[in-house]
């Protein structure tokens, strides 16, 4: 999540729509899905003919379509990227809960709320600094 935030800060600084929150959520969601996949493989290893990672991958694809529907272009701005990232990582939380990985689900929820609330506050000064040095504002 932290590495995603760093990349998002750079994107924010150069006036791109997908900033710290979006990158943090995508990074966090990807980590959750990988952890779930590995845990499912270990848990169901002895069952022949079953590939639990196929279930996980199909959930991810389905949520991707839902997230894509929440992204809108309004003039030169993209809206809904953080919502799409939030939906995606929330699917990971739901999958973790369904698989009884409750601690992973709770930790991920806390991290998502951190991204949505605290990182939002961190983005404001970066936007302000970036706007101050943007040549198009001069």
Image (cartoon, rainbow, N blue to C red):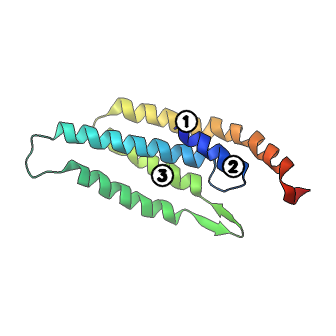
Q: Which of marks 2 and 3 is nearer the N terminus?
A: 2
Please indicate whether residue 131 sits to the left or right of residue 105 in the image.
Answer: right
Question: Which structural element holds mark 1?
Answer: helix
Q: Earlier in the sequence, mark 2 or mark 1?
A: 1
Q: Residue at the far front: name it.
A: 135
Where is residue 115 drawn, in percent x and y?
Answer: 58, 39
The mark found on residue 12 in the picture is 2
| Whether residue 93 is visible | no
The mark found on residue 47 in the picture is none
Q: Residue at the far bottom: name it.
A: 75
State which mark lies toward you, 2 or 3: 2
101 w.r.t. 80: above or below: above
Question: Which structural element holds mark 2?
Answer: helix
Q: Residues within 10 Å of mark 3 (few under 14, many from 20)?
A: many
Q: Residue at x 9, y 44 (%)?
A: 47
Q: Which of marks 1 and 3 is nearer the N terminus?
A: 1
Given residues 2 and 21, the one toward you in this image is 2
Q: Are marks 1 and 3 in contact (CB under 8 Å)?
A: no
| Whether residue 74 is visible | yes
Provide the residue designation for mark 3: 87
Please indicate whether residue 81 sits to the left or right of residue 90 in the image.
Answer: right
Provide the residue designation for mark 1: 2
Q: Which residue is drawn at 72% across and 54% down?
A: 15
Quadrant in the rendering for residue 105: top left
47 w.r.t. 118: above or below: below
Q: Residue at the far left: name it.
A: 48
Please indicate whether residue 114 sits to the left or right of residue 9 in the image.
Answer: left
Q: Distance between the residues labelled 2 and 3?
A: 21 Å
Where is residue 54 drawn, in percent x and y?
Answer: 24, 54
Where is residue 102 drawn, in percent x and y?
Answer: 34, 32
Where is residue 82 drawn, in percent x and y?
Answer: 58, 52
Q: Do the residues labelled 2 and 3 touch (CB within 8 Å)?
A: no
């Amino acid at each position: 999540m932290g590495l995603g935030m760093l990349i998002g800060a750079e994107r924010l600084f150069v006036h791109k729509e997908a900033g710290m929150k979006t990158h943090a959520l995508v990074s966090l969601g990807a980590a959750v899905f990988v952890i779930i996949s590995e845990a499912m493989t270990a848990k169901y290893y002895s069952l022949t003919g079953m590939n639990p990672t196929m279930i996980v991958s199909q959930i991810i694809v389905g949520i991707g379509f839902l997230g894509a529907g929440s992204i809108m272009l309004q003039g030169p701005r993209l809206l809904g990227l953080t919502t799409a990232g939030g939906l995606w990582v929330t699917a990971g939380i739901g999958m973790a809960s369904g698989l009884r990985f409750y601690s992973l689900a709770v930790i991920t929820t806390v991290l998502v709320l951190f991204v949505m609330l605290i990182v939002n506050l961190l983005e404001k000064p970066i936007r302000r600094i970036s706007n101050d040095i943007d040549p198009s504002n001069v």
